Amino acid sequence: MNSISTAERQLLFDFITSSTSISNDLFAQIIQLFKKKTFKKGDFILKEGDIETFSNIVVEGVVHQYTYEEDQPITINITPKGFSFNNLKSYITKTPSLEVHEAITDVELMCITRKDIDALMRKSHEFSYLMFKIYENILLDRENRMFLLQVKNPTKRYRLFHEIVERADKILDDSPDKYIASYLNMTPQQYSNEKKKMLKGQL
């Protein structure tokens, strides 16, 4: 296992404590279970047909999660630095993934296996509560995204993206426009128009 730096340790601590406070003892147990992985831009982190066995936190870079509809990629999520991701359906049901997870920049991850998570949950009530709070946040994020996609007006959708999606600013920092347009269910032209309106203070 690669050693975890002070900065990576702090990022993991900040991610965890954004959900709930934890004891120093539990954090020490958690950090021992994480492994580091690196991917080059364009590398696949998870391919269609793979079975998801990890939960991941992005240390550097941006991960694009998508599926295909009539051979066209449809964005499910974009995960920047400081946020977590996995294919939840494959992870829970242990079935082949319908999603693809791709590094759209060079990416560094901290990863923990489902096996290690389950083992620690069985022996630690504190860790079980932590996982409950983390999944609450994941569900809230997905509910906000569902609400966003129900809005038919592109201008309102773009404004809501900034208002209710916690990761919005970090997505905008490092993600090419075509991925953000797909995330917002817009054409590149629609997204470009809305972006220009915001820059001109017209939203």
Image (cartoon, helix red, strand yellow):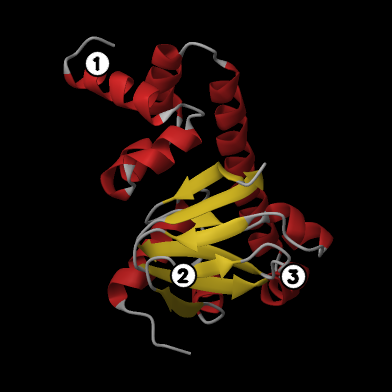
Q: Which mark is residue 118?
A: 3
Lower sequence index among marks 1 and 3: 3
Q: Is residue 179 above or below residue 106?
A: above
Q: Residue at x 46, y 26 (%)?
A: 186
The residue nearer to you, when weighing 183 against 192, is: 192
Labels 2 & 1 near each other (Cβ < 8 A): no
Mark 2 surroundings: few (<14), some (14-19) or many (≥20) residues within 10 A: some
Would residue 49 be found to the left or right of residue 170 on screen? Answer: right
The residue wearing badge 1 is: 197
Q: Residue at x 57, y 79 (%)?
A: 33
Question: Residue 4: percent from the left, percent from the top?
Answer: 38, 81
Q: Is residue 94 left or right of residue 66?
A: right
Residue 6 quadrant: bottom left
Mark number, residue 69: none
Residue that appears at 54% across and 68% down? 45
Q: Earlier in the sequence, mark 3 or mark 2?
A: 2
Categorize mark 1 by other alpha carbons within 10 Å: few (<14), some (14-19), many (20+): few
Q: Is residue 143 left or right of residue 159?
A: right
Query: Separation of disc 3 and disc 2 at Cα?
Result: 28 Å
> How far apart are the alpha carbons under marks 1 and 3?
47 Å
Q: Residue furthest bottom?
A: 1
Query: Amino acid under label 2?
Result: Asp
Decide which of tag 2 and tag 1 comes sooner along the chain. 2
Q: Residue at x 45, y 19 (%)?
A: 157
Q: Quadrant of residue 55?
A: bottom right
Name which residue type carries label 3.
Asp
Q: Quadrant of the C terminus?
A: top left
Task: Tell me if residue 53 comes above or below residue 174 in the rendering.
Answer: below
Question: Mark 2 sits on what residue?
Answer: 43
Residue 32: horizontal and vertical position, in percent? Answer: 52, 82
Residue type at the position of mark 1: Lys
Residue 117 locus on image (x, y percent):
68, 70
